[in-house]
Image (cartoon, rainbow, N blue to C red):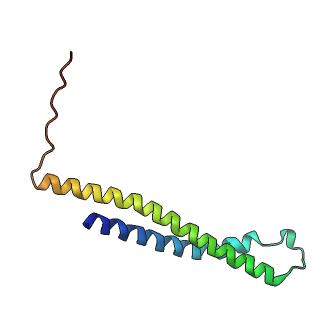
Amino acid sequence: MNAAKTLLNFILAGALLGFVVASWLGPNYLGWYNETPYATQTMCNLPEVVRKTSADLISYQVIGGGVGAGLFLILGVVVVRRSHRKARVQAGQTPPPTEPRATA
């Protein structure tokens, strides 16, 4: 149960970090992506642009949260396996010896 809690904490921390990074980088990317080339003046439908930009930012946040959760899940598995291995060595437990296979 302790390993599950640790993994859940890593997943939540990764998702939160992903949301923060996407919220921080997203507006800069959206501004660059929606910028008109060569500084020409264009006419646009502003409500549509605002809706699309907001939807894009939210989708980037969801993607960032998913990527962060996935990466931190992998990191959490590594940490949990390493801590279990250290605990086993400290307790003096050794894995059972493997028996040699008989060749017939």
Give the left or right position of residue 19, taking residue 57 as reference: left
Residue lying furthest left:
92
Check the image and report above or below for 38 versus 100: below
- The quadrant of the picture occupied by the N terminus is bottom left
Residue lying furthest top:
104
Give the left or right position of residue 87, taking residue 37 as reference: left
Q: Residue at x 75, y 81 (%)?
A: 50
Check the image and report above or below for 79 versus 24: above
Residue lying furthest bottom:
47
Splitting the image into 4 quarters, where does residue 62 fall? bottom right
**Residue 59, position in %: x, y?**
63, 71
Give the left or right position of residue 101, taking residue 10 as reference: left
Give the left or right position of residue 51, taking residue 71 as reference: right
Splitting the image into 4 quarters, where does residue 77 fall? bottom left
Q: Residue at x 54, y 72 (%)?
A: 21
**Residue 19, position in %: x, y?**
53, 74
**Residue 83, position in %: x, y?**
24, 58
Splitting the image into 4 quarters, where does residue 72 fall? bottom left
- The quadrant of the picture occupied by the C terminus is top left
Q: Across the whole image, how many numbered discs are drawn on residues?
A: 0
Q: Residue at x 41, y 67 (%)?
A: 11
Check the image and report above or below for 2 versus 100: below
**Residue 4, position in %: x, y?**
31, 65
Q: Residue at x 10, y 55 (%)?
A: 91
